[in-house]
Amino acid sequence: MHRLLTTASASLQFRTRPTNTNEHRNDPITRGDLAYETYGAPSPATTVIVANGGQASRTGKSKNVKPDASWGMGAQVADMEAVRAKFDFQKFDLVGDSYGGLLAMAYAAAHPKHIEKLILSDSAAPAWKDIVRVLPNVYPDVLERIAAREKTSFGSPNAADQRIRDHFLMLFYSEANHDAYLAGVKDLESVPQVSDAVQKANRTLDLTPELPKFKFPTMVITGRFDMNFTPITAWNIYKAIPGAKFIVFEKSGHLPSYEEPDKYVQVV
């Protein structure tokens, strides 16, 4: 399988447990040079494009991003389409994880002819207003400790990275998985300004009317204990897409691909 890993917004987030073959390239697009990574080697198998989560995370591999570059969903979809066109993929499987699920839905709505199969993994809701989060209700003690620490670390060069690490405290079913995951990442490279810009640009976005139009096979995945985008979010997406499949990972939080990798590979 030839897997292409990409996110839009002229940014690229890390992915754990990559395959052995890994190439990184920068290619000119309208807003700058879009970074992407390829995994595996070309084969007759269907290509997979993965839109990662974390609209506030970037590795800095994208270059020459224009100061006035749009963070709107239309621009992000155009980024993904530029990558597809570069490789001339006529059909591909599209996986959207977390925030990447919102981008995947937007791309699928704009370019349905290129979608072989759509997989939405612990995806954001199709509209910001419909995102259901319960972190304050489940982790009030953790959030209080985070707030207290942020008061003392405000302005620190490590504050943004610590903030996203604190957020990850609440994303796992297993504490051991949480510890192992973060131990393997030196720098999550969170950029709060990116998150703010993306949310502001897409505040009124609502893809809900587009979901019933999806005619391609769609799978909606959720971790049973996802407190970031709760299972009801995945359930509502599943109910809106004709013929979609709904899969629950019973021992996962927001990252079933990490917490139950064997099942995830089998299912996907």
Image: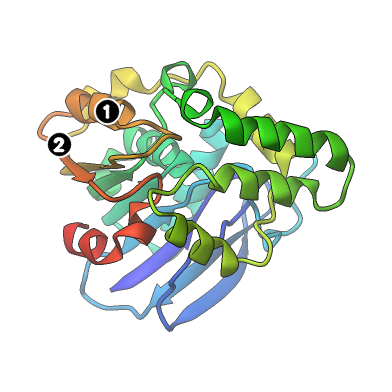
Identify the residue at horizontal 45%, vertical 48% (top origin): 81
Q: Which mark is residue 154?
A: none
Q: Which residue is mark 1?
A: 237
Query: Which of 164 and 103 lies nearest the eye of the viewer?
Result: 164
Which quadrant is the N terminus positioned in? bottom left
Quadrant of residue 184 in the image? Answer: bottom right
Drawn side of residue 162 relative to residue 249, left or right: right
Q: Residue 156 at what x, y percent from top left? A: 88, 47
Answer whether residue 70 is visible to the viewer in this image. no
Do tag 1 and tag 2 residues touch (Cβ < 8 Å)? Answer: yes
Drawn side of residue 206 relative to residue 236, left or right: right
Q: Amino acid at mark 2?
A: Ala
Q: Which residue is mark 2?
A: 244
Quadrant of residue 242 in the image? Answer: top left
Which quadrant is the C terminus positioned in? bottom left
Quadrant of residue 42 in the image? Answer: bottom left
Above or below for 206 versus 242: above
Above or below for 7 versus 238: below
> Label 1 crowding class (10 Å Cα cut-off): few <14, some 14-19, many 20+?
many
